[in-house]
Image (cartoon, rainbow, N blue to C red):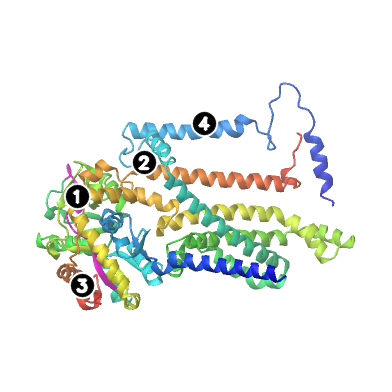
């Protein structure tokens, strides 16, 4: 019996020794695990920076396990960020400002993309509208109302002597805008890439730079975070931004990387992507353009009040 | 059980040999050509008309691609794993939501149908609530559940399916033939026996109809959830193709969704037919 007991004890001691050795050789994997972060985007080329950075391994380097989640509307992304299902999300300037005005505790942390000619107000090439002045009394289709695009074209119409109250603006789903223009539903329409390439010579721009009143290549979309989450996790936010901004800089300098990224999350054919005007990428927050855009939207009554840079942007 | 007699009787009628030269007929008295051939011919005519109208420029081919272009996109698309993953996500959400609506809808319907008090108290509210489109709940559900994962689509499925299941069950219980109930009582059946032997079988055709309606509405809402809010379902892939400016892929995915919906409906009809083999509406008749 004693021999049996001794044998068992020896066995246990051996098992314990093996266990300790294994623990020493393979420390707890959770201790070194990357922080899992969900980033909400919509499937447009402008959101490519995160994909480019992820493919380049920048997030992994920063200890971030990035999950990119698909949404359809920017407003839903705000809801998801507030609900905590996304830690970061990309939204338009107007959506971010509206959310802040409504008292939602969100902060802007990065530039998603800035304007580089990928959105235009277009008309039929063989139609009667040739200049901005011809837009008087016409019907314009837009992908969003009371936003920076509408503010930008109204500003340019006023400069050209067109009374915007004579113009009818209609909300149409962005992918359906080219068809609406082609089939005469509207006289002019906001057309975004890849719709500009897809239209070929059917359309011509009547306002080629809709965001021009807000500065040189103003920022259209920003990355947001919930303020209290950022306060509790400043290190994760910093590491995320390091990786994200490296991705944005790479996207700015390497169109092929952007094309590869866009092909991974959208159905745009490669030959279309090669012809497309890509949005601008970079780590510059372009706060001047933010202020100019907010002022332009406020002047037209699209925003209830102005939003300052201090209240909109995150500072650790 | 009384219901056994006519079922056996009808089975004997069905086994009578057909006279020579007579084409086999379905339970509804239709030939194979009438059941399958003629509807397929209608579909082919619609496809042919679509092709003709787009090729001749009557419909704008750039926005409404010809049927053959959509067909080619469909063939290419179903070879991609992402379509099946998205379809799997949609069907998983649908199955979870439908299971929840069955677990809630049938017991609630049985209670509302069995209790005069419960029926009196809740029937007006139920009739009101069921007329509200379930899609109206989407913004609130996005705030509560977010758009990530299957929860949103499952919740939408639940909201779409639970009302038809509950209300059909309720009416099924209330429409039990009082004479049959009296006969049951006369044979000494207690409340539990009456419920199991008379109420439940009588209500079953209604419940089956509720399930079929609920399943289809639930599938529509499961697709709509990812179509409007994003996520991982087939609805999002339709939107993605639309954002990408590839209309043939948009229509190919809509067709795929339609085929899945048709498959779900036919499967449920087949299951309903088998489970209700004893019911008067399923018996063969000899004319």
Q: Which mark is residue A166?
A: none
Marks 3/4 same chain = no
**Residue A45, percent from left and from top:** 27, 53
Check the image and report above or below for A17 versus A135.
Answer: below
Please give the label number shown on residue A298: 3
State yes or no: discs 3 and 4 in contact (Cβ < 8 Å): no
Question: How many angstroms separate mark 4 from mark 2 (CA)?
Answer: 23 Å
Q: Which residue, given by chain and number where applicable, does mark 2 sit on?
A: B248
Identify the secondary structure beneath mark 1.
loop
In whole angstroms, how far apart are the C-alphas of marks 1 and 3?
29 Å
Q: Is residue A70 left or right of residue A128?
A: right
- Is residue A256 in the magenta section? no
Cβ atoms under marks 1 and 3 closer than 8 Å = no
Which disc, if any, is residue B41? 4
Chain where mark 4 sits? B
Question: Which numbered dot is residue A277?
Answer: 1
Numbered disc 3: secondary structure: helix
């Amino acid at each position: 019996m004693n021999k049996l007991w001794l044998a068992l004890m020896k066995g246990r001691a051996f098992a314990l020794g093996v266990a300790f050795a294994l623990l020493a050789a393979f420390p707890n994997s959770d201790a070194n695990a990357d922080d899992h972060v969900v980033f909400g985007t919509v499937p447009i080329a402008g959101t490519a920076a995160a994909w480019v950075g992820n493919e380049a391994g920048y997030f992994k380097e920063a200890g971030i396990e990035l999950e990119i989640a698909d949404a359809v509307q920017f407003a839903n992304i705000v809801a998801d960020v507030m609900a905590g299902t996304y830690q970061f999300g990309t939204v338009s300037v107007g959506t971010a400002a509206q959310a802040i005005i409504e008292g939602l505790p969100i902060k802007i942390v990065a530039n998603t993309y800035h304007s580089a000619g990928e959105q235009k107000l277009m008309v039929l090439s063989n139609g009667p509208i040739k200049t901005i002045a011809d837009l008087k009394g016409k019907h314009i289709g837009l992908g969003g109302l009371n936003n920076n695009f509408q503010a930008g074209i109204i500003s340019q119409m006023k400069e050209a002597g067109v009374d915007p109250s004579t113009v009818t603006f209609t909300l149409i789903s962005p992918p359906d805008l080219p068809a609406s223009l082609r089939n005469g539903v509207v006289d002019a329409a906001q057309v975004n890439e890849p719709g500009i390439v897809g239209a070929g010579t059917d359309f011509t721009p009547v306002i080629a730079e809709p965001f021009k009143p807000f500065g040189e290549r103003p920022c259209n979309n920003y990355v947001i975070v919930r303020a209290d989450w950022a306060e509790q996790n400043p290190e994760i936010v910093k590491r995320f931004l390091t990786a994200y901004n490296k991705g944005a800089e790479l996207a700015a300098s390497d169109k092929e990387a952007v094309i590869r990224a866009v092909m991974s999350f959208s159905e745009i054919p490669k030959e279309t992507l090669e012809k497309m005007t890509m949005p601008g990428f970079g780590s510059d927050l372009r706060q001047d353009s933010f202020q100019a855009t907010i002022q332009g939207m406020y002047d037209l009554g699209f925003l209830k009040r102005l939003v300052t840079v201090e209240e909109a942007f995150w500072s650790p | 059980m009384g219901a056994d007699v006519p079922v056996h009787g009808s089975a004997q009628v069905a086994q009578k040999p057909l006279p020579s030269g007579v084409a086999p007929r379905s339970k509804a008295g239709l030939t194979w050509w009438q059941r399958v051939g003629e509807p397929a011919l209608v579909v082919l005519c619609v496809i042919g008309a679509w092709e003709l109208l787009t090729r001749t420029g009557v419909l704008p081919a750039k926005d409404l691609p010809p049927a053959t272009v959509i067909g080619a996109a469909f063939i290419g698309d179903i070879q991609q794993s992402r379509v099946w993953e998205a379809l799997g996500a949609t069907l998983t959400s649908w199955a979870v939501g439908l299971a929840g609506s069955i677990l809630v809808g049938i017991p609630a319907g049985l209670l509302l149908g069995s209790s005069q008090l419960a029926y009196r108290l809740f029937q007006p509210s139920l009739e009101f609530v069921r007329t509200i489109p379930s899609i109206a709940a989407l913004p609130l559900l996005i705030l509560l559940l977010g758009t990530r994962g299957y929860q949103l689509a499952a919740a939408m499925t639940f909201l779409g399916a639970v009302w038809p299941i509950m209300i059909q069950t309720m009416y099924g219980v209330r429409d039990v033939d009082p004479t049959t109930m009296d006969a049951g009582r006369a044979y000494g059946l207690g409340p539990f026996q009456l419920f199991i032997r008379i109420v439940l079988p009588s209500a079953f055709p209604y419940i089956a109809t509720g399930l079929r309606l609920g399943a289809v509405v639930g599938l529509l809402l499961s697709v709509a959830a990812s179509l409007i809010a994003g996520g991982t379902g087939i609805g999002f892939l339709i939107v993605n193709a639309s954002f990408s400016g590839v209309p043939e892929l948009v229509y190919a995915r809509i067709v795929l969704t339609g085929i899945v919906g048709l498959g779900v409906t036919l499967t449920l009809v087949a299951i309903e037919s088998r489970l209700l083999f004893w019911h008067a509406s399923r018996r063969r008749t000899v004319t």
